[in-house]
Image (tube, rainbow, N blue to C red):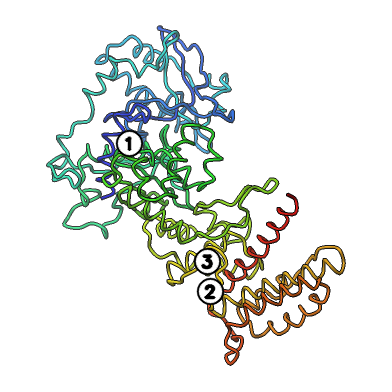
């Protein structure tokens, strides 16, 4: 299904010049330098072909060349009218002797001289004369070759606007002399269902983080143990040569092409690539949304992309009736997301998700509904931006580890899959967040949202967005009580000393109160009587009523539980977070009234 989806995508991408899709026998390559020649074959100069990006960094230029990729293997395998410095100019790589480069330069030269008579082109003849005259001893005179390193180069004539290999005569000859399929095994292609020459090797996929720079195989058989029915190599998964070229070209275009920023993102060691089966607004902005959530609108500079993001977020917030603004037929448009990870010279498929756009949007809305909780910062405070009402998936992963550490890549993939498929969230997310809360003794908006979402979806708990006065679960009530006692301590200390506390009961008792409440609650309630004495009478009455509202529903005969399981710890944390936000929201409202 993966290969078939990519095969079908090739036709759409090929019709869009922005993707620079190649025809069979050609491929886009990163070119770092150009060898400029006179018509006689004399060298004019070797110049930098790289171009600066928006940050001023010099990057290779993407140019369509003859051949689908640099041939693999350790033998002598020259390309045609392009290659690296060893083949083009006889430069000896570090750690190799002079004969290594000499043999490869000679192989490149003989390949071109053998084709000169058939091609019958003046510019190609100039390349042949250059190859006959060139000596590697002249390499030291061109500093640019040291800068570009192992990058590829091409030939270009002085005064010409295009490289030599882009001549129509040369391209016509190349098409006519592509390797014949007559010797290939014929069979039924798994992707098209038609009889066709079967590809012995599948295309190399480039642009996967951590994989070999020369590319890695998505389909390959390197051991007899994986073969069957006497078939060898990729004949075990028969795909026609044309179909293999199409799916490989489409995947490489999204991973490593000029539009790759629109189609790929990274989750730990997994590179994700996504697309729709026809042009869609969602395809244009999904990368930005996945990377920054609803904050993407603030991050994006392009006004057109920002407008599309606003339409997308509006559809998520308003419901299915707004889907039509995203796509003319969201039920028919298909969305695909493929997660690939490196595995030596091969690729591992971490996950493959496919659905209609309407189903995708419905699942994203379900995710937003499950995690929705009162935010810590509803509006910007100083340099701190407001909390996102739709956090990016990585914001949850970041809260599972210490600052600076990398989250589990397996957790990242599982988290994204649960969001897209509306399946239960990984329990490891829940336990990791609880562990960080115990260690840090603090609960921020993202942690609270993550805990709520797991309890709602996985454990079928009914949890409100804001403080729930009707929730009578003991652990939730104890979390609320802890927040009230902490607030009493803060205000009592401020009334007594005129300054804020550096350390509250949260730093000392929160973790124990959350997991084994019976061990500490009597102690912290006794401590609160000291701080309550310093409050003014009106405030003291307010707090007494709050404590009574929380403690009254609890069963006196049962008492405070000796320990909480993980689910109860999550409820305790949410009770604390809800009550804390309620207390501060009232203070903020009172301050606003006083200011007015």
Residue placed under numbered mark 3 in the picture:
451
Is residue 277 toward the left or the right of residue 255 in the image? left
**Mark count:** 3
Label 2: few (<14), some or many (≥20) within 10 Å? few
The residue lying toward the viewer, choosing from 108 and 497, is 497
Identify the residue at image location x=45%, y=17%.
Answer: 134
Q: Position of residue 418 (x, y in %)?
A: 41, 60
- CA separation, marks 1 and 2? 48 Å
Residue on which the image places disc 1: 279
The residue positioned 86% from the left and 63% from the top of the image is 498
Q: Are marks 1 and 3 in contact (CB under 8 Å)?
A: no
Name the element at disc 1: loop
Q: Residue 119 location, x and y as percent? A: 27, 15
Q: Earlier in the sequence, mark 1 or mark 3?
A: 1
Q: Closer to the camera, 119 or 289?
A: 289
Q: Secondary structure at mark 3?
A: helix
Left or right, residue 354 beside residue 189:
right
Foreground label between 3 and 2: 2
Above or below 213: residue 117:
above
């Amino acid at each position: 299904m993966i290969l078939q989806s990519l095969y079908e995508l090739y036709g759409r991408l090929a019709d869009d010049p922005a993707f620079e899709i190649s025809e069979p026998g050609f491929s886009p390559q990163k070119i770092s330098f150009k060898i400029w020649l006179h018509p006689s074959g004399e060298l004019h100069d070797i110049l930098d072909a790289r171009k600066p990006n928006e940050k001023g960094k010099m990057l290779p230029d993407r140019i369509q060349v003859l051949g689908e990729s640099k041939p693999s293997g350790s033998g002598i395998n020259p390309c045609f009218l392009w290659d690296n410095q060893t083949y083009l100019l006889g430069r000896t790589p570090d750690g190799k002797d002079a004969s290594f480069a000499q043999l490869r330069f000679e192989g490149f030269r003989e390949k071109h001289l053998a084709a000169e008579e058939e091609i019958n082109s003046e510019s190609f003849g100039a390349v042949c004369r250059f190859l006959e005259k060139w000596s590697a001893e002249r390499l030291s005179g061109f500093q640019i070759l040291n800068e570009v390193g192992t990058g590829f180069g091409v030939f270009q004539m002085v005064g010409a606007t295009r490289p030599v290999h882009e001549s129509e005569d040369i391209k016509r000859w190349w098409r006519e002399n592509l390797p014949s399929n007559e010797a290939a095994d014929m069979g039924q292609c798994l992707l098209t269902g038609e009889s066709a020459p079967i590809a012995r090797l599948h295309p190399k996929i480039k642009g996967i983080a951590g994989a070999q720079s020369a590319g890695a195989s998505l389909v390959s058989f390197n051991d007899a143990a994986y073969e069957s029915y006497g078939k060898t190599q990729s004949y075990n998964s028969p795909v026609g040569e044309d179909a293999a070229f199409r799916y490989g070209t489409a995947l490489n275009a999204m991973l490593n092409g000029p539009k790759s920023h629109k189609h790929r993102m990274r989750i730990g060691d997994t590179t994700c690539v996504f697309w729709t089966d026809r042009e869609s607004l969602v395809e244009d902005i999904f990368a930005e949304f996945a990377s920054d959530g609803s904050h993407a609108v603030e991050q994006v500079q392009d006004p057109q992309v920002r407008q599309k993001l606003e339409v997308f977020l509006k559809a998520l917030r308003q419901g299915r009736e707004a889907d039509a603004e995203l796509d003319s037929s969201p039920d028919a448009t298909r969305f695909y997301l493929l997660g690939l990870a490196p595995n030596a010279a091969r690729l591992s498929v971490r996950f493959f998700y496919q659905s209609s756009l309407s189903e995708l949007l419905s699942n994203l809305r379900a995710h937003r509904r499950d995690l929705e909780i009162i935010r810590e910062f509803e509006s910007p405070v100083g340099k701190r931006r407001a909390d996102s009402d739709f956090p990016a998936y990585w914001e949850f992963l970041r809260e599972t580890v210490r600052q600076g550490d990398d989250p589990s890549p397996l957790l990242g993939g599982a988290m994204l899959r649960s969001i897209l498929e509306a399946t239960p969230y990984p329990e490891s997310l829940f336990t990791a967040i609880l562990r960080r809360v115990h260690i840090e003794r603090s609960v921020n908006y993202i942690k609270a949202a993550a805990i709520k979402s797991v309890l709602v979806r996985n454990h079928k708990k009914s949890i409100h967005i804001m403080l729930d006065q009707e929730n009578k679960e003991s652990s939730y009530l104890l979390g609320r009580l802890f927040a009230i006692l902490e607030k009493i301590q803060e205000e009592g200390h401020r009334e007594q000393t005129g300054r804020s506390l550096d350390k509250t009961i949260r730093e000392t008792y929160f973790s124990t109160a959350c997991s084994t409440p019976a061990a500490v609650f009597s102690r912290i309630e006794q401590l609160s009587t000291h701080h309550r004495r310093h409050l003014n009478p009106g405030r003291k009455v307010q707090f007494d009523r709050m404590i009574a509202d929380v403690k009254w529903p609890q069963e006196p005969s049962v008492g405070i539980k000796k320990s909480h399981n993980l689910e109860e710890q999550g409820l305790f944390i949410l009770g604390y977070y809800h009550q804390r936000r309620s207390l501060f929201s009232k203070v903020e409202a009172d301050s606003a009234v006083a200011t007015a």
